[in-house]
Amino acid sequence: MLDLNIFISKFVTHRDASMFHCDIEKYSSKLEKNINKKSILVIGGAGSIGSSFINVILRFKPSELVVVDTNENALAELTRDLRSTKDMYIPKVYKTYPMDFDSNVFKKMFLRHKGFNIVANFSAHKHVRSEKDIFSVEALIQNNILHAKKLLDTLSVFPPEVYFCVSTDKAANPVNIMGASKRVMEDLIFSYSDKFPVKTARFANVAFSNGSLPAGFLARIQKLQPLSAPSDVKRYFVSPLESGEICVLSCILGENREIFFPKLDEAQMMSFDRIAEALLNNLGFEVCYCTSDEEAIDKSEALKQGSKLYPVHFSISDTSGEKSFEEFVADNEHTDLTRFSSLGVITNKELPDKHSLDNLISNLNNAFSKTDTTKEEIVLILKEYLPNFNHLETGKSLDSKM
């Protein structure tokens, strides 16, 4: 039986304890002061990071917790998990709403509630594979930028004490549309920072989070299907617990218009093929290296007869938008590495040019109002706003791979 938490700490993050534990302990009094008896709205709270954020923030006993997510089943499981956990604090006012934060019913709920002290938004398109075609690109841009702007307008009616949302390491020197959209999102929330404090965090892949490649390994193994992974792509990883802790620290302890990132160095990056190998070895399999997806699929039939030779196909990445490495900070950004032991802070960010940002929003809305807009046009619109956006286009999508 695989203990996933032990596997993550031993073979993925190489940390026996959370890297943020010291800062959580050091600032526990300030965290409690700023969370205790406060009303909290968590959007996208049933996902991997949102639910981890909820588990961490409940330690400090808020008075109300409202969770919004479009995944009704995941909301039900979140509630079951919270109510089944020993000594878990759940406020008397605890509500879950299966709704889209861009919907009229969400706006009605928010206005009737007359706002919240803390609002954290985890609803986003987070995968590079989301840029495979113009329709996927539009859905990504709508969620990460255009709908996010409508949310900020709604929040402005009853301004929160703090607004937090997640960025990504892919926003630093972006090469894919998802990363570029998150870089725009950073400017977008900063443009509302005169109405309420805004904070965000760029951080690494969450190990075995919903929809991630490592989570896909577990699904493939359960079905006795072969594993496929890039052999040349390295990523930073944090554990599910760490993902919640970095968001709580950034949300509650950050100053207005600050971007947080974990203090990880290049030696701590892991490649997906190494994770796959370690996972199979821990489950008692011997890795069988194949030269194609087809060969791996054919050889996987032997698994049904009890073979312990597990077929894998590792290959060089050749899909659009994939960097071989990741980074948290662009060359022109200033950082403070002394404030926290586990976190760096990007400070002194200039306010975005309102005219340029408004023009970008207008151009995107105009593009999506047409039926013949192309992915290439959207890339050009984003590049006009983000001159350092060097889109990496190969003509291939992750959907063409196992």
Image: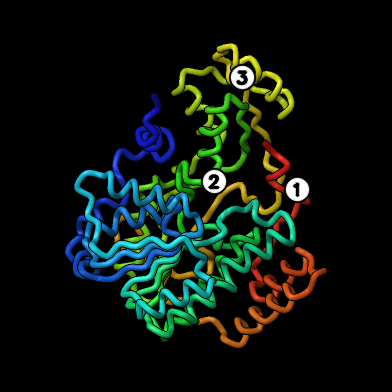
Could you give the CA–CA distance between mark 3 and mark 1, rounded to whole angstroms?
26 Å
Secondary structure of the residue carrying tag 1 is: loop
Q: Is residue 342 left or right of residue 212?
A: left
Across and down, in percent, residue 128 comes to 62, 53
- Image height of 108 relative to 270, above or below: below
Secondary structure of the residue carrying tag 3 is: strand
Residue 200 falls in which quadrant of the image?
bottom left
In the orientation shown, which residue stands out farthest toward the right? 372
**Decide: marks 2, 3 in contact (CB < 8 A)?**
no
Q: Amino acid at mark 2?
A: Gly
Q: In front: mark 2 or mark 1? A: 2
What residue would you read off at disc 3?
288
Q: Can the viewer see residue 208?
A: yes
Q: Amino acid at mark 3?
A: Cys
Query: What residue appears at the point 79 percent right and 65 percent down from the top-left corner?
Result: 374
Could you give the CA–CA distance between mark 2 and mark 1, rounded to whole angstroms?
19 Å
Q: Amino acid at mark 1?
A: Lys
What residue would you read off at disc 1?
396
Q: In front: mark 2 or mark 3? A: 2
| Mark 2 or 1, nearer chain start | 2
| Mark 3 or 1, nearer chain start | 3
Residue 120 falls in which quadrant of the image?
bottom left
Q: Residues within 10 Å of mark 2 (few under 14, many from 20)?
A: few
**Looking at the rendering, in which quadrant would you find the C terminus?**
top right
What residue would you read off at disc 2?
211
The coloring applied to the image is rainbow
Across and down, in percent, residue 241 comes to 35, 48
